[in-house]
Image: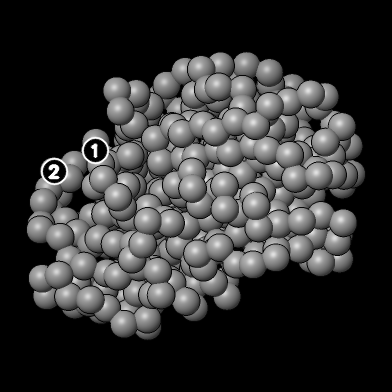
Amino acid sequence: MDRDWPVSRLSLFRCEHAALPQAACSQSASTQDGLRAGVFSGYASVGVAAALALALAAVSAPTRAQTTDDIRGWLLDVNRAAQQQTFVGTMVVQSGADMVSAKIWHIDHNGVALERVDLLSGEPHTTMRKGETVFGVDHANKVVRQERRSDLGLFPAVRGSAGERVAQHYVMQSLSATRVAGRATVGVALQAKDAWRHSYRIWRDVNSGLVLKWQTVSTTSGDVLEQVAYSDIAVASGIDVPQMQAWQQVPKNYMVMRKDTQSFEAGALGWQQRAPVAGFESGMVNKPRLNGQLIDGAPAQWLFSDGLASVSLFVEPLSARGQRQPSAVLLGATSSVSAAVPPMWVTAVGEAPVATLRALLTSVQFQ
């Protein structure tokens, strides 16, 4: 992901309701609020429109491996297609016995995506989206957090340079047809070629191309680590532009906080990766800003990706939080590993196995 801590959908909600262990919740409140703004919109804003026929043809033969162009092209189509979709639905995120849900309204208006997401679990929270601008509405505290995001979509990492090599790490296979939310779907598996990354199963609506169900699967055990699916959805109906625009007005008496990041090359900061880890390529380092000012003491986020999965290293001085012990946390599809990498304390978080995060921690150095 481009800017936010990429914890799992369910882990985010656990954090908000004080059930997530502190080792995985240690980031700043502003970072977690930014996460909340994009969690469901990333899943709602996926599908296939003009390229649906090509995508369906690519998965029509049973368990047929795809070429590099097939896989990356399919992922790019999924990322951009919902710009042409209008739908209303209820999305459910499940990990083990835990479950959370949200109501989603999405409309395309002259090529600009307009969206509203209301959490149906826990404290009330609304997220609005207009193009790449996301507004997180915290009703309890009467605060609106606004930010621009370029990482919306189900597979944002595939657009970067690492995405050009995604077929080195995954193979595409077809799955048997099934029904999701009462609609016929076609399924695709993105099977990892090694144990350094998870595998994925994705089902898309046959008619609209929208992604209706997504599973993150352990490559070693085959267990479903996390599932995201619509329980109901109405495509091409249920919302109009004036109604959406009225919703996107900032409520009276709410404070607006504007967030963004300042990006740096890792080498310019004296940060290096001694050796690559399982195809996870080093990206930019982002430092969070609030109302145009760098947030003092907030961890910097160093991005890594294999073109599909993303991992972030959150980096802060060892002295920033006093004495701490190394830790590892696994919640559904998300792992978190924290350790000292002198002179820094580093927390690796991502939808990847614990062994991958530990290898990334040992591969970096700071000067």
Q: Look at the numbered disc 1 and give the secondary structure of its residue.
A: strand
User: Circle 2 sits on which residue?
Assistant: 182
Q: Residue 149's x, y, as percent? A: 64, 54
Q: Is residue 80 above or below residue 326?
A: below
Whether residue 199 sits left or right of residue 63 in the image: it is right
Toward the viewer: 35 or 167?
Answer: 167
Q: Quadrant of residue 271?
A: bottom right
> Taking the image as drawn, is residue 186 in sight?
no
> Taking the image as drawn, is residue 55 in sight?
yes
Numbered circle sitting on residue 242: none
Q: Quadrant of residue 142?
A: top right
Tell me which residue sits at (76%, 63%) in the image. Answer: 272
Whether residue 58 sits left or right of residue 106 in the image: it is left
Tell me which residue sits at (49%, 48%) in the image. Answer: 355
Toward the viewer: 185 or 331?
Answer: 331
Q: Residues within 10 Å of mark 1 (few under 14, many from 20)?
A: some
CA gap, disc 1 and disc 2: 7 Å
Whether residue 229 sits left or right of residue 73 in the image: it is left
Position of the N terminus, as image quadrant, is: bottom right
Tell me which residue sits at (71%, 57%) in the image. Answer: 364
Toward the viewer: 289 or 352?
Answer: 352
Numbered circle sitting on residue 232: 1
Tell me which residue sits at (46%, 40%) in the image. Answer: 334
Query: What's under tag 2, amino acid-wise?
Result: Gly
Q: Residue 54's x, y, as percent? A: 25, 79
Toward the viewer: 10 or 130?
Answer: 10
Q: Residue 52's x, y, as percent? A: 27, 72
